[in-house]
Amino acid sequence: KTNQQWGGRFNEPTDAFVARFTASIDFDKRLYAQDIRGSQAHARMLNKVGVLSDEELKAIIEGLDQIRGEIERGEIDWSIELEDIHMNIEARLTDRIGITGKKLHTGRSRNDQVATDIRLYLRDEIDLLLAEITRLQQGLLEVAEREADTIMPGFTHLQTAQPVTFGHHLMAWFEMLSRDYGRLSDCRARLNYSPLGAAALAGTTYPIDRAYSAELLEFSAPTANSLDSVSDRDFAIEFCAAASLIMTHLSRMSEELVLWTSAQFDFIDLPDRFCTGSSIMPQKKNPDVPELVRGKSGRVNGHLIALLTLMKSQPLAYNKDNQEDKEPLFDTVDTLKGCLRAYADMVPAIQSKGEQMREAARRGFSTATDLADYLVRKGMPFRDAHEVVGKAVALGVKTGLDLAEMELAQLQQFSDTITSDVFDVLTLEGSVNARDHIGGTAPAQVRSAVATARAQLAAR
Ligand code: ARG
């Protein structure tokens, strides 16, 4: 017996292995709710234009509602022979309501159907992800405000550079995530067009109303070209690119959390509930959550490359290659959701160790630039000031003294322009407070950045 959905022109049944090899039901069953929603909109449209009668429409809508219930109660036996979610649901509908079920696929193809399903799916998931990014950002604002005055070393090359405030550092994370939020929102806006009606590739001969089904599904409008509608998965690739960037950001944050929780940095503590121990070393408390997030960035990047590669050589219009878009896409969504959730839960619980951070900033000659700027204000060209301070640092390295700990006379041997007011700029507070402009690290700027950011979140 050949396939019941398309077996008419076939003379022998599909090879059993080929049936399993080509089926997608194992993973695309996840699209059942979107598939049913899309089918119901399609049926309503067919009824509006006179292709389905009111009774037929009613039977289809109710039948699909019941199938949704069956699926959610786990009562459906998915069939490999029926290949995918689309044909499984359609066959079940025909089982339930009889011949009318076979009319649902009028003026439609699985090609525009699946393109619709994925867009609906991704749109829903993006909304959840956007909410989770916002939750994480709210947590960051909370901690940033609390830590607006906390001084830590800022780094370049992972070498102590200049003092910054911990709040300022966290607000850098906030900014990364704001751009991520924007990218996901852009992706959502660009994918939100309805492929329904593109049918297999060329459109359909029925007097369809594409604007109507688009509206029922809350799409902005129908897509403009039928060939493009069923073939391109650029929206999924764009989503994965945005996801890769989010994971890149989370991975960088993770790297910092891992460093900061080490005994060598000792800048912060993560609550026990976000860490695990070692089965052999009793003293261990490992930052597993950040490490795992950092590691998971790898699979998300991999999925992006998988989708780019599966798309790149496809001639118009639909090709079965596109069936391979789903597993990477689903895993990207799941991974991202888990990582964002972990971060949104964990970030507000970060406990800073202000004394240790401060001590690290003090030890690293982090106010050397402030001393150079001081000399410039007294009339010395910057390059000369750089040289003078470099010599003072060399002395500090030898004696183990930070610049602020040296005697005035010691400093004056490098330049007699230095007077006792120098100690105002050599303090850590003096250094951060002096960077008091938009985007600077001064506590006052951190507070105002937090206020601006709160207003941005409130306006979302
Ligand atoms: N399972 C298919 C996919 O995921 C649905 C579309 C199949 N269309 C076709 N003509 N074989 O892409």
Image: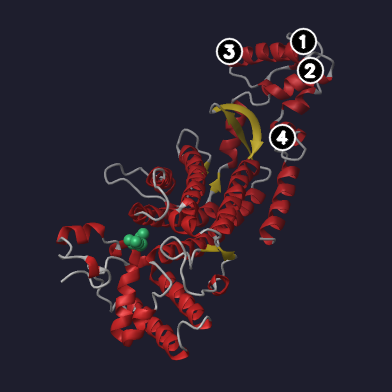
Whole-percent x, y for residue 11 in the image: 16, 65
The local crowd at label 3, few if under 14, some if 14 to 19, many if 20 or more residues have their Cα within 10 Å, is: few
Q: Earlier in the sequence, mark 3 or mark 1?
A: 3
Residue behind mark 4: 432
**At x 44% / y 70%, what residue is drawn?**
34
Whole-percent x, y for residue 22 in the image: 25, 58
The quarter of the rendered structure image containing the C terminus is bottom right
**At x 57% / y 71%, what residue is drawn?**
211
Mark nearer the viewer, 4 or 1: 4
Q: Earlier in the sequence, mark 3 or mark 2?
A: 2
Residue behind mark 3: 398
The answer to which of 210 and 429 lies nearer the viewer is 210
The local crowd at label 1, few if under 14, some if 14 to 19, many if 20 or more residues have their Cα within 10 Å, is: some
Q: Earlier in the sequence, mark 4 or mark 1?
A: 1
Which kind of residue does numbered mark 2 sit on? Leu
How far apart, in angstroms, are the residues tagged by discs 3 and 4?
A: 26 Å
Whole-percent x, y for residue 431 in the image: 72, 31
Mark nearer the viewer, 2 or 1: 2
Outermost residue, front side? 205
Residue behind mark 2: 375
Which kind of residue does numbered mark 3 sit on? Lys
Location of residue 364 with respect to 97 vertically, above or below? above
Q: Earlier in the sequence, mark 3 or mark 4?
A: 3
